């Protein structure tokens, strides 16, 4: 199943998270925190409203077709999209866990507890979607999607336990494909060919200390991936990129709003120079 509707819930989270000061989270010691049930109630209300909204959209777009007994999808799942949807299934719980945990910390929960609750919520929601797909004649339960969902929810926990992993950050970007411009999709999120998936590597942090001071902390290296011509079985193919990436959290400046914006907008890749390395070599002054 396409992951078009996942970013809608993510947007709700993102809009919610911008309403609280980051330093309120950072400066309160865990042992001094007390849960603010008014804040927790507000978060719960936003969550329930977001889930109801997303479910309505998914039901209309993906689950209104013919129903079936529960079944697994074992062939089409990896064939048509060339596995490109798996990044989306990884990325949504990864993003939701990171952003939602900030909301829970704001309500008074400690960092690790917030991450666990957020990861569990994201994973359970994605699992519900997969089970619901299993009863749709058009889709079916996908073990590949389920595995990607699980890894995406687990990765923020691993990053917290093993800080070295924070040097490897996942991002997404969009640029309208030819088919999207011709009206093949209503929204760009629904088009794999318009979607670019990125692994951003924090070069600055990985360099020896004596060299770090010479390398800008806001410039990362990224490895990118997309797919093209999916409707032409004989010509559909992967695209691979090597690119620069702006690490917004490495930008100078401080303050709760600025830090909040840097942290959360850093999940989206802003255009930067890149080179396509497969198929063929193409240089881009700016790659979206």
Image (tube, helix red, strand yellow):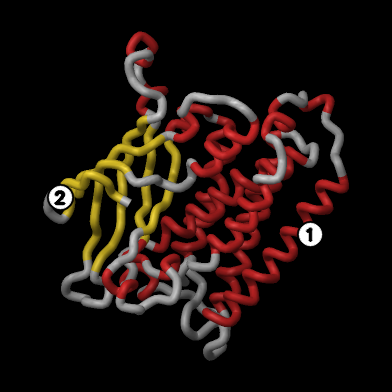
Percent across and percent down for residue 175 are 34, 59
> Which is nearer the eye, 70 or 129?
129
The answer to which of marks 1 and 2 sits earlier in the sequence is 1
Looking at the image, residue 158 lies above or below residue 172? above
Percent across and percent down for residue 77 are 39, 71
- Residue 45 — which label? 1
Residue drawn 17% across the image and 46% down it: 283
Q: Which residue is mark 2?
A: 282
Q: Is residue 112 left or right of residue 227?
A: right
Residue drawn 39% across the image and 76% down it: 185
- Badge 2, how many Cα within 10 Å: few under 14, some, many 20+? few
Of helix, strand and loop, which one carries label 1?
helix
Residue drawn 56% across the image and 45% down it: 154
Q: Is residue 27 left or right of residue 90?
A: right
Looking at the image, residue 84 lies above or below residue 73? above
Percent across and percent down for residue 39 are 82, 46
Looking at the image, residue 206 lies above or below residue 169? above
Q: How far apart in space, not on screen, are marks 1 and 2 (Cα)?
A: 48 Å
The residue furthest left is: 280
Of helix, strand and loop, which one carries label 2?
strand
Residue drawn 63% across the image and 35% down it: 257
> Which is nearer the eye, 4 or 141?
4
């Amino acid at each position: 199943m396409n992951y078009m509707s996942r970013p809608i819930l993510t947007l709700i989270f993102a809009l919610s998270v911008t309403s609280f000061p980051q330093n309120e989270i950072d400066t309160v010691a865990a042992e001094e925190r007390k849960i603010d049930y008014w804040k927790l109630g507000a978060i719960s209300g936003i969550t329930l409203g977001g889930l109801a909204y997303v479910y309505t959209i998914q039901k209309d777009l993906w689950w209104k077709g013919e129903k079936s007994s529960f079944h697994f999808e074992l062939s089409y799942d990896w064939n048509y999209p060339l596995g490109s949807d798996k990044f989306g299934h990884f990325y949504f719980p990864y993003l939701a866990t990171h952003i939602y945990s900030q909301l829970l910390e704001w309500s008074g929960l400690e960092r690790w507890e917030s991450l666990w609750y957020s990861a569990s919520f994201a994973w359970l929601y994605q699992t519900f979607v997969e089970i619901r797909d299993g009863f749709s004649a058009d889709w079916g339960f996908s073990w590949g999607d389920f595995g990607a969902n699980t890894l995406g929810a687990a990765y923020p926990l691993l990053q917290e336990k093993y800080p070295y992993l924070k040097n490897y950050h996942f991002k997404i970007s969009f640029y309208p494909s030819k088919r999207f411009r011709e009206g093949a999709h209503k929204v760009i999120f629904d088009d794999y060919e318009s979607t670019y998936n990125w692994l951003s590597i924090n070069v600055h942090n990985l360099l020896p200390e004596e060299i770090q001071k010479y390398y800008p902390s806001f410039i990362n290296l990224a490895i990118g991936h997309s797919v093209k011509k999916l409707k032409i079985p004989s010509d559909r193919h992967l695209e691979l990129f090597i690119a620069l990436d702006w690490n917004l959290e490495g930008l100078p400046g401080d303050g709760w709003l600025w830090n909040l914006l840097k942290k959360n907008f850093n999940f989206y890749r802003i255009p930067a120079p890149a080179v396509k390395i497969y198929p063929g070599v193409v240089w881009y002054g700016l790659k979206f």
